[in-house]
């Protein structure tokens, strides 16, 4: 009989091994246009490692468990690399997600009932920026700003007037479905006028900020939060950085012991590897390709009559208003998934449809760019999207065209992933 401890998953649990295999082929054989997803390098996957066995409650050189010498080493390395890239002098790499990063900032800097000012979810913000269904909107007096009706850009006049009127303790700049540059300097001016702390949630843009391809919140924001798994291309997780040692101390205490026990050490190891990759020429080339591919896809879609919110993009993502095509975001997401193009429905600013239906879809090119999609394939992808949503061509022929693209895209060797 096999020893349970040393047997491999395909021997001990073929049911789960088969699911992993199916997911491998799903990822390989579809086109991922989800703006918040990416494919980590094989090295980042490798680093997601036996550190899963280690409890490391506390911080480097101040742990509550023995045997943490290598955990200390790698966490300090991850922090050091993050500091080099983003210029903020202090970092917490222990938070498990982007939402938790924001919650830790709230716990460190606010009291329940305090006023916060964030970007409305309906206009492109994130749940954690004050939505009523989220802790940020339940425990705080959340006031939200939106975009202008004429050009869909963030309404900085509204931000200023709301700030002057409500005197928020915290202002949040950052978004999940906003494709243009955010004016962090202007947010700073407004925060200074009312004495607010400024948090920049750069989850979507951090990979582009690291390569100077999107405006940096440094030195404008007091604190930045990010996920590590979007354009940044690291493992699923979060990070918080701050300028001031006192603020960082409070944030560290909010993460542990305020909100969590032990960190997910294997994720921290993988973050360290991703942060090294961020500093490479290879990543700069990647980030440039992301912007080039986003602009190409946007241009192709506009030529086919699609209405892009703000008329284009300055980032990896685009938001498409499907009202003219007479199709909902929900139906578009479903139809595209039928042919092997994976994306998400998304509300558009001033959407009259519910968040379950929506009038739009959001596309991002971070994942397909990692797989080295070519310009010709981007053109063909736009054609396929048009033929799926507007011409309603046969699903089989569209699927075959998607397969022609995915066949040419890079993917992990099955030998390294499967069993
Ligand atoms: C701007 C922003 N902040 C926070 C988050 C939350 O990240 P997570 O899903 O890791 O909790 C997201 C996720 O998409 C995001 O877009």
Image: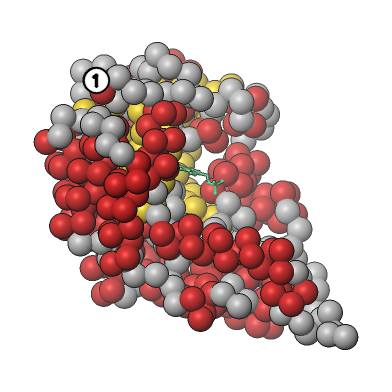
- The image shows a total of numbered marks equal to 1
Quadrant hosting residue 326: top left
Q: Which of 264 and 258 lies nearest the eye of the viewer? A: 264
Q: Is residue 49 visible?
A: yes
Q: Is residue 305 above or below residue 102?
A: above
Image location of residue 52, percent across then percent down: 70, 72
Q: Residue at x 61, y 25 (%)?
A: 133
Q: Nearer the viewer, residue 270 or 37?
A: 37
Relative to residue 19, is residue 83 drawn left or right?
A: left
What residue is at 65 percent from the left and 82 percent from the top? 70
Q: Along the horizontal axis of the image, is 176 left or right of 402?
A: right
Picture quarter with the C terminus: bottom right
Going 14% across and 41% down the picture, which residue do you hit?
299
Q: Which quadrant of the figure has residue 230?
A: bottom left
Q: Quadrant of residue 371?
A: bottom left
SS under mark 1: helix
* Disc 1: CA contacts within 10 A as few (<14), some (14-19) or many (>=20): few
Q: In the image, what residue occupies the spot 36% across and 17% down?
A: 350
The residue identified by callout 1 is: 324
Q: Whole-percent x and y of residue 348? A: 35, 25
Residue 377 position, x and y percent, is 21, 56
């Amino acid at each position: 009989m096999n020893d349970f401890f040393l047997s491999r998953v395909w021997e001990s649990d073929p049911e789960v091994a088969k699911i992993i295999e199916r997911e491998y082929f799903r990822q390989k054989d579809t086109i991922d246009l989800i703006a918040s997803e990416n494919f980590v390098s094989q090295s980042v996957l490798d680093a997601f490692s036996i550190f899963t066995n280690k409890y490391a409650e506390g911080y480097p050189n101040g742990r509550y468990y023995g045997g943490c010498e290598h955990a200390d080493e790698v966490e300090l390395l991850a922090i050091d690399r993050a500091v080099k890239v983003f210029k903020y002098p202090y970092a917490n790499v222990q938070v498990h997600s982007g939402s938790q990063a924001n919650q830790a900032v709230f716990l460190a800097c606010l009291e329940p009932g305090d006023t916060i000012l964030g970007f409305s979810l309906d206009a492109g913000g994130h749940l954690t920026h004050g939505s009523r269904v989220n802790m940020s909107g339940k425990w705080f007096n959340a006031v939200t700003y939106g975009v202008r009706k004429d050009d869909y850009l963030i309404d900085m006049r509204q931000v200023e007037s709301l700030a002057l009127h409500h005197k928020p303790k915290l202002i949040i700049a950052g978004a999940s479905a906003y494709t243009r540059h955010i004016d962090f300097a202007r947010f700073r001016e407004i925060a200074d006028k009312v004495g607010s702390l400024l948090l920049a949630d750069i989850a979507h843009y951090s990979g582009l900020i690291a390569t100077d391809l999107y405006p940096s919140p440094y030195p404008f924001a007091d604190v930045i939060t990010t996920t590590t798994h979007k354009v940044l291309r690291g493992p699923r997780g979060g990070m918080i950085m701050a300028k001031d040692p006192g603020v960082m101390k409070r944030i560290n205490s909010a993460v542990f012991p305020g909100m969590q026990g032990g960190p997910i050490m294997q994720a921290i190891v993988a973050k360290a590897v991703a942060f090294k990759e961020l500093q490479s020429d290879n990543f700069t080339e990647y980030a440039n390709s992301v912007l080039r591919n986003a602009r190409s896809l946007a241009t192709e879609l506009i030529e086919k009559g699609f209405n892009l919110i703000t008329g284009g993009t300055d980032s990896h993502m685009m938001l498409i208003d499907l009202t003219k095509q007479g199709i909902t975001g929900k139906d578009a997401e479903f139809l595209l998934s039928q042919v092997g193009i994976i994306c998400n429905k998304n509300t558009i600013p001033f959407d009259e449809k519910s968040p379950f239906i929506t009038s739009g879809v959001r596309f991002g090119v971070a994942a397909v760019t990692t797989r080295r999609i070519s310009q010709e394939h981007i053109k063909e992808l736009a054609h396929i999207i048009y033929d799926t949503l507007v011409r309603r061509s046969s699903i089989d022929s569209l699927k075959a065209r998607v397969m022609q693209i995915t066949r040419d895209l890079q993917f992990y060797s099955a030998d390294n992933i499967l069993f």
